[in-house]
């Protein structure tokens, strides 16, 4: 997934708009992920995973900080997220299916079809999980769209999709 100069420009623009409240968007994305994909809660058994909890807000800020780090080092995402990749693969052992992969290859994606991340925050979803690993990145895009619908025009959505796919690929690169 090569990011073009236009992709990088789009990603940096979106980040410049959302960075002041990216932690809130991260928390919203986690809440949506838990609602749409309850099995992801297993990694947070020691935390309060109720919508709006302090634990969700703290982790939302961590997710946003990692994405911000990737944006700041968009030409070297692998280097910027190397330690985080090690943490998730070696210590936390998070299933790589929970990290984003490009939506453009997903039949449900954001192009129609029932998307469980579109459930209101905290609302349960009866939809089956998406066919490709896209959980948190997908929900992050939906949260951006919910908070800033004007930001995600078609070309920007594709750029964000590619970027989050690249972040997901980096985070899963250390799995064996």
Image (cartoon, rainbow, N blue to C red):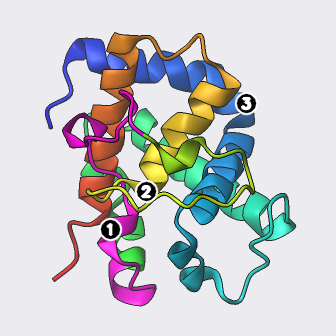
Alpha carbons under labels 2 and 1: distance apart:
7 Å
Which label is found at residue 20? 3
**Residue annotated with mark 1:** 97
The spot of residue 54 in percent (x, y) is 85, 65
**Which image quadrant for residue 24?**
top right
Q: The magenta stretch spans which residues? A: 89-113
The spot of residue 164 in percent (x, y) is 36, 42
Mark 3 Cα shell of 10 Å, populated few (<14), some (14-19), many (≥20): few
The residue drawn where x is 50% and y is 36% is 141
Q: State if disc 1 and disc 2 touch (CB < 8 Å).
A: yes
**Which image quadrant for residue 124?**
bottom right
Q: State if disc 1 and disc 3 touch (CB < 8 Å).
A: no
Q: SS at mark 1?
A: helix
The spot of residue 171 in percent (x, y) is 32, 62
Mark 1 Cα shell of 10 Å, populated few (<14), some (14-19), many (≥20): some
Alpha carbons under labels 3 and 1: distance apart:
29 Å
């Amino acid at each position: 997934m090569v990011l073009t100069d236009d992709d990088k420009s789009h990603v940096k623009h979106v980040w410049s708009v959302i960075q002041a409240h990216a932690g809130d968007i991260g928390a919203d994305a986690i809440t949506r992920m838990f609602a749409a994909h309850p099995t992801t809660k297993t990694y947070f058994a020691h935390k309060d995973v109720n919508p709006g909890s302090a634990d969700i807000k703290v982790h939302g800020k961590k997710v946003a900080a990692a994405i911000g780090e990737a944006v700041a080092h968009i030409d070297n995402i692998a280097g910027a997220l190397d330690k985080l990749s090690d943490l998730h693969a070696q210590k936390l052992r998070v299933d790589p299916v929970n990290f984003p992969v490009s939506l453009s290859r997903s039949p449900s994606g954001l192009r129609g079809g029932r998307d469980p991340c579109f459930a209101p925050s905290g609302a349960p979803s009866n939809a089956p999980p998406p066919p490709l690993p896209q959980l948190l990145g997908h929900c992050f895009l939906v949260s951006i769209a919910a908070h800033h619908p004007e930001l995600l025009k078609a070309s920007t959505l594709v750029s964000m999709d590619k970027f989050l796919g690249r972040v997901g690929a980096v985070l899963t690169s250390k799995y064996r």
